[in-house]
Image (tube, grey):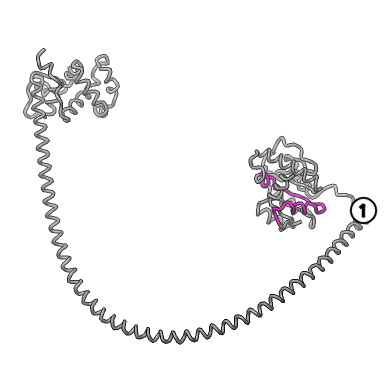
Amino acid sequence: MGAADFMPEPILSEPIRQRVVALAAAVLTALPNDEMPVALRKVAKFAPNRRARLGGAAIAAQLTADSVFRQRISGRVLADAGELGSAVLGGMAPAAADPIEVAALAYLARPAGWRELLDAAGQAVAAEAESTAVAEHIRDAETRAARAEHDRAVARVEADKLRDELARVRDELGQVREEARASGKALRDAQAQLKRANELLSIEKGRAAKGHGDHEAELRRLRSRLADAEAAAGDARQAARDTRAVDEARLWLLLETIGQAAVGLRRELALDPAKVLPGDTVAAAYADMAGAPTATNRAQDADDPARLAQLLALPKAHLVVDGYNVTKRGFAEMSLEQQRNRLVSGMGGVAAQTGAEVTVVFDGAERVHGLPAPPRGVRVLFSRKGETADEVIRRLVRAEPPGRPIVVVSSDREVADGVRRHGAYPMNSESLVRRLTRS
């Protein structure tokens, strides 16, 4: 073993190092698995175009540290290189050969004098790089010179344009001076006209002041007449209130008379209590739905529980409730089943307290199973498939005779407008929710 074997590894220039890695990566998969270093087995599985790029550092490190691996690689690389590989193995570098290729083969094969081959290749690469840099500088200088010549030509063209522009500006300046002289004369004429206009304005201001005084006098006269009219209107309102009180007393006497006449007529006709209510005729169409049939004053304050109580106090009132419209405003946090049970049980209390007929209508295209029996006096209906609770409510209202008080509880504006046209009293859902939560 000679002294050269103990010399440190040479530092390869980047082009030579890349070519060494590329040659080794190309023949890496030709090694048997038992000759493949453990550190490179994963790299050997990479695609050929990625092996040198992703595993280059590992390949270079293994070539430096493992001389046996390098010899195995060099044998295959020299065989692939053909005559150039044989020349390098003999310590020769053909003059026409690429110095980087010669240096890479010499680094892998390491024949006698391989370091000199590396040095010569390094010098050739450096000279080529320097030559390339000089050529680049020359091209840059030529480009700058061409650009400077172009800039000078552009500057000459711009100078010609500026001279033409200067001549044009001078002509325009002469025109502006002429216009300024004309404008000065026009200004003097305008100032004279302004002076005359100010004199006329002073005259008109005097006339306006006199007109304003006349207007103020007229305004005072109108205010006096307005006060007299308001006093007369107050007297008229008082007279209207007195007349209304008399009319209300007459209306009360008329209603008392009608009520007593109705009692006498019922006694005279000896009518038995009705066994079938109009709402039952509508409910009969829903007999196959969950819930069983059992047994309103137009609202002024649609969300006032007191107004709802007044309406339910009317004789033979019928209360129709838009079920889910009410529960989703009062018990939205509950499940649908809990909402239904809470509303129906509460309506049982309302029916018991007021004696009114109560019908609760829910949307439900399919049959709802497991419903508890409704309280006495409460009818529970579910709309059929293809039908909404709003339509069922309108059918219930249309089925009632004219004059019977029907109260419909729903915050749906379309429902409220529809039942109002048929003589029912619409109330907001909040009025019923407030009554249920209070009771």
Q: Nearer the viewer, residue 44 or 365?
A: 44
In the image, taking residue 217 as reference, residue 269 lies left or right, namely right
Q: Is residue 109 magenta?
A: no
Q: Nearer the viewer, residue 335 or 104?
A: 335
- Dividing the picture into quadrants, the one containing residue 63 is top left
Residue 383 appears in the figure: no
Residue at 11% from the left image edge and 51% from the top image edge: 145
Residue at 9% from the left image edge and 14% from the top image edge: 2
Residue 227 appears in the figure: yes
Question: Magenta span covers which residues?
Answer: 301-327
Residue at 10% from the left image edge and 17% from the top image edge: 4
Q: Residues within 10 Å of mark 1 (few under 14, many from 20)?
A: few
Q: Which residue is mark 1?
A: 270
Q: Is residue 317 magenta?
A: yes
What's under tag 1, amino acid-wise? Answer: Ala
Residue at 85% from the left image edge and 62% from the top image edge: 255
Q: Identify the image quadrant of the C terminus.
A: top right
Q: Position of residue 108 (x, y in %)?
A: 15, 21
In the image, taking residue 13 as reference, residue 420 lies left or right, namely right
Q: Identify the image quadrant of the N terminus.
A: top left
Question: Which residue of the protein is positioned furthest toward the top in this rendering?
Answer: 1
- Dividing the picture into quadrants, the one containing residue 248 is bottom right
Q: Position of residue 269 (x, y in %)?
A: 92, 55
Q: Position of residue 103 (x, y in %)?
A: 12, 26
SS class, disc 1: loop
Q: How many marks?
A: 1
Q: Position of residue 44 (x, y in %)?
A: 27, 22
Q: Is residue 192 above or below residue 164?
A: below
- Dividing the picture into quadrants, the one containing residue 285 is top right
